[in-house]
């Protein structure tokens, strides 16, 4: 089992499936009012360079529900790169806490923290990957479909969410179709890795520039914002590039029974129309809820084995 949770691609399929099963079990326990104290006395440090609602609340609440404790660290407080190196921060934290979740711009920084620290490091989001979101996504899909038969169509920007989604699908053997502009595909190295993983698992992964082709007959249609954090100055140009990639009623004629996914926050009226986001097939808040339980499963596995 890997020490860290940096990318879903680092974990074998059987381990990811066990995490998904445990997340659903923890959700059932939570709904019954049961709180297994599996992390009693454990402390999680949370280093966040980016704004956060879901990641912050679900990790802190998750630690509390499992009997542990979480400490929020702000970048101006820690001063990585100004006060001290990431490696020195990781070595210090390894003497005090049991695990670290890092939400950063740089993916290399998360890898440095994991390499230099002796404690488990969890990728809470980088510009390259968002593995915890992918785990919540597949918990949500598994609640409504057999993963081996599920078809997920992702429409929009080939960002960190899209990258982790296609990697997870490739590991787990799930069909994932990406529809992005040619200029905004997932990075070539991510796509190559996903292709290799899919060849081993039997997963079908596909890319198209045509969103209508991707959604045809899909059971799940997923989108994300067109301009992510740090890309605000590109927002107007991206609205022009992605104008034909909005998830709306017209696009969904090709998949009228599809469930709607969005990792949130949503820019209503841009990547998704209000009537779809708030419609009866939308499960975006189930998806957000499942961040809590997926991350509890990850924390348990890393801290208790």
Image: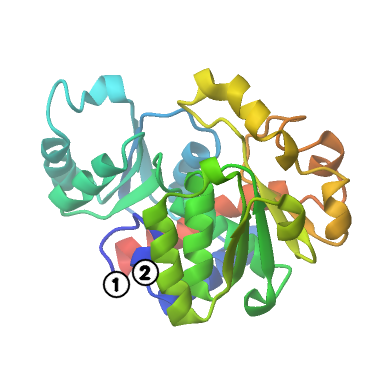
Q: Is mark 1 on a helix, strand or loop?
A: loop
Q: Looking at the figure, which quarter contains the C terminus?
A: bottom left
Q: Position of residue 144 (x, y in %)?
A: 73, 68
Residue tagged 2: 11
Disc 2 packing (10 Å; few <14; some 14–19; many ≥20): some
Query: Would you identify the image quadrant in which residue 217 lies?
Result: bottom right
Q: Where is residue 74 in the image (x, y as percent from the top left)?
A: 33, 26
Vertical relation: 155 (above or below) 272: below
Seen from the viewer's position, the closer of residues 207 and 278 is: 207
Q: Looking at the figure, which quarter contains the N terminus?
A: bottom left
Residue tagged 1: 1
Total marks shown come to: 2
Whichever of labels 2 and 1 marks the residue nearer the N terminus, that label is 1
Q: Where is residue 209 in the image (x, y as percent from the top left)?
A: 64, 50
Vertical relation: 166 (above or below) 203: above
The residue drawn where x is 53% and y is 22% is 234
Seen from the viewer's position, the closer of residues 99 and 262 is: 262
């Amino acid at each position: 089992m890997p020490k860290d949770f940096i990318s879903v691609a680092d974990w074998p399929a059987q381990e990811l499936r066990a995490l998904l099963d445990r997340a659903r079990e923890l959700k059932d326990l939570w709904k019954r009012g049961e709180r297994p104290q599996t992390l009693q006395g454990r402390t999680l440090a949370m280093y966040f360079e980016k704004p956060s609602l879901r990641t912050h609340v679900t990790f802190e609440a998750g630690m509390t529900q499992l009997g542990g404790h979480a400490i929020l660290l702000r970048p101006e407080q820690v001063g990585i790169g100004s006060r001290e190196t990431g490696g020195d921060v990781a070595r210090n934290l390894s003497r005090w806490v049991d695990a670290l979740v890092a939400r950063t711009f740089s993916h290399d920084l998360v890898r440095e923290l994991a390499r230099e620290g002796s404690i488990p490091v969890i990728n809470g989001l980088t510009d390259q990957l968002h593995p915890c979101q992918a785990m919540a996504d597949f918990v949500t899909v598994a609640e409504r479909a057999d993963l081996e038969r599920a078809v997920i169509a992702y429409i929009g920007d080939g960002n960190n969410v899209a990258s982790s989604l296609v990697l997870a699908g490739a590991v787990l053997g799930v069909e994932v179709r990406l529809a992005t502009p040619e200029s905004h595909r997932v990075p070539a190295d991510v796509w190559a890795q996903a292709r290799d993983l899919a060849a081993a698992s039997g997963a079908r992964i596909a890319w198209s520039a045509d969103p209508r082709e991707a959604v045809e007959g899909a059971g799940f249609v997923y989108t994300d914002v067109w301009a992510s954090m740090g890309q605000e100055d590109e927002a107007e140009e991206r609205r022009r590039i992605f104008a034909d990639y909005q998830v709306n009623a017209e696009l969904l004629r090709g998949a009228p029974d599809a469930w709607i996914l969005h990792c949130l926050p949503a820019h209503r009226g841009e990547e998704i129309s209000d009537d779809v986001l708030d419609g009866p097939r939308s499960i975006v808040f189930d998806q957000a809820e499942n961040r809590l339980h997926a991350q509890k499963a990850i924390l348990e596995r890393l801290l208790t084995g």
